[in-house]
Structure formats: structure tokens, C-alpha cells
Image: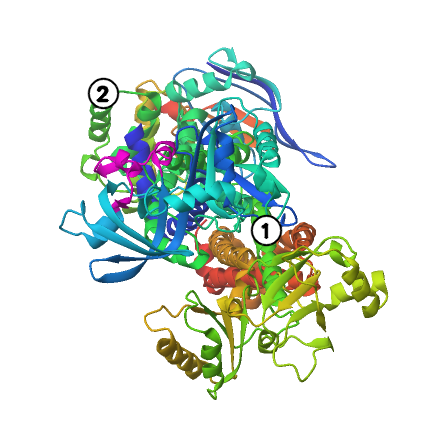
Amino acid sequence: MIKLSKIDKYYDSRFQRTFILKGINLEVNQGDFLTIMGPSGAGKSTLLNIIGLLDEPSAGEYYFWDEPAHQIREKQKVQYHRTHIGFIFQAFHLIDELNVYENIETPLIYRGVKGKERKALVADFLDRFNIVAKKDLFPSQLSGGQQQLVAIARAIIGSPKLLLADEPTGNLHSEQGEMIMKLLKKLNDEGMTIIQVTHNEKFAQYGNRIIRIEDGLVRSDAMNIALQAEV
Amino acid sequence: MVLYSLKIILRRLFKDKAFSTISLVGLVIGIASFLILFLYVSNEKSFDKHFNDHERIYRVTSIPGGREETLWARSLGIIHTATARIPEIEDAIQFSHCEVGTIKMGEQTFQQNDIMSVDENFIEMFSVQSKVGDLSEITRPNTVFISEDFAGKHFKNENPVGQIISIEALQYARNIGNYEIRGIVKNTHPKTHFKYELLLSQKGGLQERYEAQPSQKTQWLYNYIKLRKGALPREVENKLLSYYDASSLKQTRGPKDYQFQLVPMDDIHLKSNFRFELKESSSKINIGLFLFISFVILLVSLLNFVNLTIAKLIKQSKELGLKKSIGATQGQLTSQILAEVFLFCLVSIILAFSTIEFIKPFVNKFFEIDFNIYYSEPVVALSVLLVLGFCLGLTAIFVGLFLLRKTSAIEILSGKINYSGSHILKSLLVLQITIVIIIISSTFLVNKQINFVLNQPLGFDKENVVVINLKDFSNDPAVFARELEKQSQIASVGFTMQHFGYPAQSLPLEGLGIDGTAEMVFANYNYLETMNIQLLENWISPSADTVRGMVINNHLYKRLMERHGSMEALKTFNESQPLESDQTRINFVGVAKDFNYSSAHEFVGDFAFWLGESNNLARFIHVRINSGSLRTGIDKIRETWNTYYPGQEFDFFFIDETISSQYKAETILSRILFAFSIIGILISILGISALALFISQQRTKEIGIRKVNGARVSEILTLLNIDFVKWVVIAFVIATPIAYYTMNKWLENFAYKTSLSWWIFALAGLLALGIALLTVSWQSWRAATRNPGEALRYE
């Protein structure tokens, strides 16, 4: 469903061209849980943003749902963001002025979902994530783990096919991190394709496939043996 | 969606109170000043537009030859006779207007303003509406209709109809007779170039005067005509002239040649500087300038607002990026931002209107204008739409330019944009400061010029002179003057028919062998002494009891000497000229040092005093009080007045005040500029302080790092200030030539002008710089003194 071939991303400055990604080839299938690892500045987040249609590659071909991404128009991108892609971030990016309920509701509003349907859907998710009691609290009143929980709820309320997580546990302590990863694993088991970026070896193991990027190049791409062994 | 946006907007407004308040206050000040000026101008422009066919109504003026400089609103009675023969004229009326008359009701005698005598055509042309009574009764002799105001003041609970008003004095006429009140008319529309309290019938007491008008060369009546559609005013003027030229009136005594002019009624309120204008016009106020300044102030405050809005958007940029990532379209984001701006503007406009209602009395007093908002008029709605449109348009343009087009969601999300990197925002701030510097330097210059003009050596001494306006000549004013001179506080007393600033008569100079006319004033010799007008040549024989003859000014003297060479030659020439039966030979008795009779707008011209001793010269009694005893002096004069003229109003003024009132236009201009430099400065302080706060917040981390590395507080403050200093300097460089050019243009209006000193600009620039430095330092102080550990904690 996602295919990148020879993707480059670079910035030109006056005397030299700085590559962030160089010749990335990558294929992701439906139902994959892909972990991208690598040191700081390796280009992980850039890759994720390109996959999520937030950024454009400088060269190469990218097929999103078998559609060439460079031909996708702005309008269609918005549609994909609404129905196909969900994002979660290291810094959660919840809207400070909105409470838990309203934050989860936000994507539905942009999607033009009717009020009644919206209410039912949000109530369902609050229930599913076990945060009904917190629905009137504002982000500043929640712990990091709870905030990320809300962010995940917001990301998947539109039932996207692909969930992109940019260091989802980076700002959390291990216990909360564990909880978030378990949740992601559960979503993957339910059929959602997930691509995550992480530094944490332990959390990387939740993926069924791990690629390592260094200096803009894919250094390794392997099925997660530990997981296979478990199966 | 709407509810959702509203929720976010309101919560954000209350969360960031300081920022919201600053934006709001800046915008309210700007919008309120704009609305005051804009609505004032549109009020002024809409004068008389409520009359049917207002564009076809003209005032007819008649200008005697040689008097082209002082135009009168009143004109010859023959005009009305002529109008009947001119087919282009649909309707013609004439009426009289008395600014202050004396009337008696019951046992009470009092002064009454705005008494007019009219006929049924007036009622029709100016749509006078009756509240009580039948207006056709105005054609009956000795009837009077009173205004609602008059009725409310004098007949609170009784029916005025049938009551008698006795008209004791109207201008020059006395004891016109008793008039019966036949009804009440609605008050004059406030936006009319005249006002009536009493409407007298032209029949009865005034009939004889009206009937005599067509055969006299007096200008006592106001003539108005309504032209037929398509008729050319020029042709009507010509026809009036040919009628006059053919009439026997031309051959009678007085000026031979007249010009006739049609003045569109629509122009009267804005442009008239006629003598005997019915109501004070706004010709002294530069309407165009008002309009221009109003837009400049609106622009400054909107620039400020847009700047702050963008700064706020940068703060929220992460949120915008996030929303994009979850599928918000650009349209949705833009409309959310604009909805916020719209709401903000709407609240500001409402607050601005309440502010205006509150400060209206002060504004009216300060600018000496009569400002009111007529909410039912479409122009109010229009101005609101204008502000909203301006506000939304400007924000949309800049927000679009800045945020949505060029930046991808990812750049926004990563927080890469910051204020100091944006050229658009910098130029917005620079533009704003530029305008403020221009306004400040203009204020300095206008003040300098006014002071310069007021302190010009005038050629006479304007201080400590009281002028009494004498209306009743039944008691000999000479006796009154002698009595005054006995008082120790009083230096001297002089009589004149025209005081300084009052239009002078004109003296044709052909009889003396040179072109043109001189301004001439009738006065007695004591008047020259009272005003301290120096005589360069004095041919008055010291033994003479009374002084009769002409004193000319040095300017005219030099011209005459150029033509004739000597006084003797002039006398011979003068005596060789033919003399009409009612003229007297000019007898030169002296030459006065040049003085400034008119305002500093004009150079000194030819001038002459016709000196005599007759009592009717005492229309304006000038009294010089010894300096230091002004108050007791006035008390003494009042006391003497009350003994000599019992029951008469003591009507006096100071000549220096009258002289400074000639600069009303400039005084008002300087007040406007002063008020708006304050407003401009205020808005800029608000803007700069919000931006400084914002920038210091954005650079918290940088400041922390610098401090960890050993930077001192003073160094941090310098760092934060240096950008603003740069912007002020750029603004100064742009502002100076523009201000220099505009001021040079303005100074051309004056014959005597002050110099455009460099310090005007330097001071304005320094002021702007000082304000910026103070505001920035004040706002950045907290950021600079903060514990660096705290600043660096968040990553």
C-alpha cells in the first residue's frame, strides 16, 4: 500500500546540497507494524512526514495507496488526512484551549460529521480508552501518558488505515510508555497499519519489522525475529 | 463548526488576557478616532442635502465693484424683482435673518437669536413643517410662528397660539410692532446652514422695508432661487446682470457696477466665508485633511492589529499545523482566523461607539466642532462596514501572505517560523512608526508656526485692549469716553467703525493716480493712540481741537511717492480731480508705520484711516487698560457702562483674542495633530510593547543560553532593543523627506512663515526612539532577569 523508491530529500544551501534522505526504498504492506530507528538527525521524522503527506520528497517516487504521491492534489491530500492517516507526536500537540472531549472531537468537526453522530462516536472512544471521567479536563490537567492517550484517540477517531507515530513515548516515563505501546499493538492486531519512529530498543520490538536509518540511508531492514520466535 | 471556533476563540482571548487587551485597546482607539472624524466629515458634507431639489437651489450674491475680497451673503433687493423675468428660475425667495434681536413678551424683554422674516415660498422651498397651526397664515400681516424649542422654553404648559410677541429691535430697525403667534413649527433640521427660532411674516411691520428694497443699493436680504432642471447658473448670472444694468437703480448713488453670482446651496456650509453668513460654516476646517487623517489613524491602528494578530498566529502555529495534519482544509483554517478577527473587530466597533458617546462632549469642546452621530443614517452603517472590510481585508492579505501560502504544515509544526525572521511583519512595524514620526513632526511644526504668527510684530499693541460693541447711540459716546478716561486704570479710549479682524471698507485709489483699492477704516484720532499705532509723519497741527483727515500707511505712502514724487505734487493732482457733490476732498494728515491689519496669511497692503470725530464712529469703543489692572479696569468700565447705558447688555471682547481667532483653522489643525500624535504614540506603544513581549517570549531559550554563558542583564536588554532601534532608524529615514515635503507645502499658505528647523525632525525621531527603547526594555525586563535554569528547563 505504500511504496517509496529512490526517495531523496535535500536542502540546497549556497555551496552545497545537504541530504537528509538519500535513495530510500521502502515498501509497507497493510497490517504492518513498522518501526523506524536511528540516531538523531538520521532523517526518521522527515521520512515519516513524507509518508504522511505533510512533506514532499525532493526526488524519487512515492506511491500512496498505489497513487503517485507527487500527483496528489492539495484537496486530495486533505481527504487522505481525514480518512487514511492518523498522526501522533512526541509532544502530543493537544489544543490547550479545548478539553479532552473537544480535542477528540476536533477531526470530526473538520470532517463535517453531524452533531449526534459525533457525540456517539466520541462517547464510544472515551469509553474504549477508559477516560470518560476525564472528559472535561484540559490538557494541562492531565499526565503525559493520559495526554498521549487522548492524542491517540484523536488520531484514530476517523478510523484511519495508517497511523504514524513520531516518537510517541519520547516524553513519557517507561510505565506510561509501555501502556501506549500496548495500545498501539492492540490497534495493529485489529488491523491498523502503524509506522512508528523511536529511539527506544525495547519499544522498537513491538513492531513486526524494524528498519534502521543512518545519515539518510537505510542500513538494515529486517523482520522482527523476536516477535516471530514468539509466534 | 461555528460553535467550535467560537469556543476556541473565546477561551483563547481570556487565556491570554494581556495580549487580547492590548490588541483590543489599540483597535478601539483607532476605530473610535476614525469614526469620529469620518462621521464628522460626512455630517458636514450632508448639510442641506435633506431639502428637495437641494442641488438646484442657489444663493444669489451681488458684489459691488472693488469689494471682491469681502463677499456678503446678503444681496440687493432688486434680485428678487429680476427673478420673475428670468425663465430659467423656477422659484425665488427672499428673507431676512437677525442673529440677535430684542423681543418683549408680557413684561419681559430679552435678547433672542435667529429671527427670520419669511414668506410662503420659503416655507415651501425649505419644507418648513408645522406642528401646531396653519402655515399659510404666514402671509397675514404681523403673524409669527415659533420653533418647538422656543415654545418649550417660554410656554411650558400653555398654548402659545394667540400670544403676542413685541419685536423691539432687529439689526438696525427698532420697534417693528406686535406679532401674534399663530403656530409652532418643527425645529430646523440640525444639518441646515441656517436656523430659525422665530419666523415673522414679511407683511405688516416689515412690509415697508421689503417694498423699499428693490429701489435701494442696500444689501439687507438673502436671495435664494431654485433653477429649472438643466438651467445653467452662468446664464442666469448674466441675465441678472443685464437686468440690473438696464434698471434705473444702477444710476443712483453708490457703487455703479455689481457682479452677480450663484452660489450652490450644497457648497455653503463647507465653503462659505461670506460676511453675514447665516450660521457658522466649516470653511475654516479643512474637511479633506480631516478625512485623510481619519484614514491614516485607522491604518495605523489596523497595521498594529494585523501585526499583533500575526504574532498571535505564530504562537498558535503548532495548533494550525496539527489541524492540517488531521485534515483541516486551508479554507477552514483561514475562515477560523478571519472569524476571530471579525469577532474582535465587531467588539471593538461596539466599544468604539460607546467610547465616542462618552467622550463626545470633550471632543466637541476641544476641537470647537458640533459633532453628533445620527444612528439612523446609512453612513453610520457604511462606516461600520468600511472598518470591518478594511480590518478583514488587511488581515486576510497579510495572514495569507505570511502563513498559509508559503509555509508547509511541517514547517509550522516544527515551530520554525519566528517573528524576527519575517520581512512582512518588520515592514508593518516600520510603516507604523513612519506614520507616527510624520504626525509628531507635523505637530511640532504647526505649533511653531502658530507661535511665530501670534508673536509677529503687528505694528500695534494688541495687549490689554477691551473692545465694547455699542449698539445704542442715543447717549453721546464721547461723554462715556471722557468718563472712562478719568479712571486711573484706563489709559485711553478710541472709537472706530471696524476693529482689527473686522472687514474694512475699500477706498478706490484712481483719484490718487494709482491702481487698486486700499483698505480703509473710519476711526477717531484717539483710536490710533489707543492701539499704539506709530506715526512716521505727522502733519496734524498741534493746536487743532479735533483731528479730521486721512492717515495712510507707509506702504501706500511709498507707492504714492513713487507716482508723484512729493506730497505737494500729490495734493495738486488730487485737487485737480473732479468731485461729486457728496464727496469730500481727501486731506492727508499723517503716515502710519506698517501694521498687519489682516492675518499673517497675507502681506501688508495699502491701508488708510479716515479720521473724524462724529459719534457714529463709536460702534466699537476701544479701551486700553493699564497693564496689571485688567480685572479692576473691566469692573470700572462695566460700572460706568451701567450708569450711562442702563439696561443695555455690556458686550465686550479682547482684541488679542479676536486676532488669535483669525488662526482658528491653524489652531484646530494643531489640536487635531496634537490629539492624533498622542493617539498614534499610544497605539505604537501598545504595539511595540506587545511585540517586545512576544519576541522575548520566543527568545526565552536563547536568553537562557546567553546568560548561562555569562551575559549580563544589560547585554540581554541591548540585544532585545537593537532590532527595534534599527526599525525606528529606518522609519525615521523614510519619514523625514515625506514630512519635509508636506510641511513645506503647508507653510506656503502663509505670508510670514517660520523656518523648518532640523530639530523638529530630530526631536520627532528621538521621541519615537525613546518610546521604543522604554517600551521594549520595560517588556523585556522580565525575560532578561529570569533565572536561566527555568528558561532552559523546557525542551
Q: Are marks 1 and 2 in contact (CB under 8 Å)?
A: no
Residue B36, how many percent across, how many down?
42, 47
Amino acid type of the residue that numbered disc 2 sits on in the rendered structure: Glu
What's under tag 1, amino acid-wise?
Answer: Thr
Q: Residue B112, image x and y in percent?
A: 32, 56
Instruction: Kindly indicate the quadrant of the structure image that contains residue A172.
Output: top left
Residue B352 visible within the image: no
Q: Quadrant of residue A78?
A: top left
The image quadrant where one finds the N terminus of chain B is top left
> Residue drawn at (30%, 32%), measured in percent from left and top?
B4
Q: Can you give x and y, in whole percent of width and height, for residue A21 in the image?
A: 60, 29
Reading the image, the residue beneath label 2 is A117
Give the class, few, some or many, for how many residues have Cα within 10 Å of label 1's Cα (few <14, many ≥20). some
User: What chain is tagged by disc 1?
Assistant: B
In the image: residue B658, left or right of residue A215: left
Direction right: furthest residue: B565
Q: Quadrant location of residue A23? A: top right
Residue A1 in sight: yes
Look at the image and give the residue range highlighted in magenta. B119-148
Q: Label 1: which residue?
A: B70
Q: Is residue B771 magenta?
A: no
Horizontal and vertical percent position of residue B247 = 58, 36
Task: Tell me if B718 is positioned left or right of B542 in this view.
Answer: left
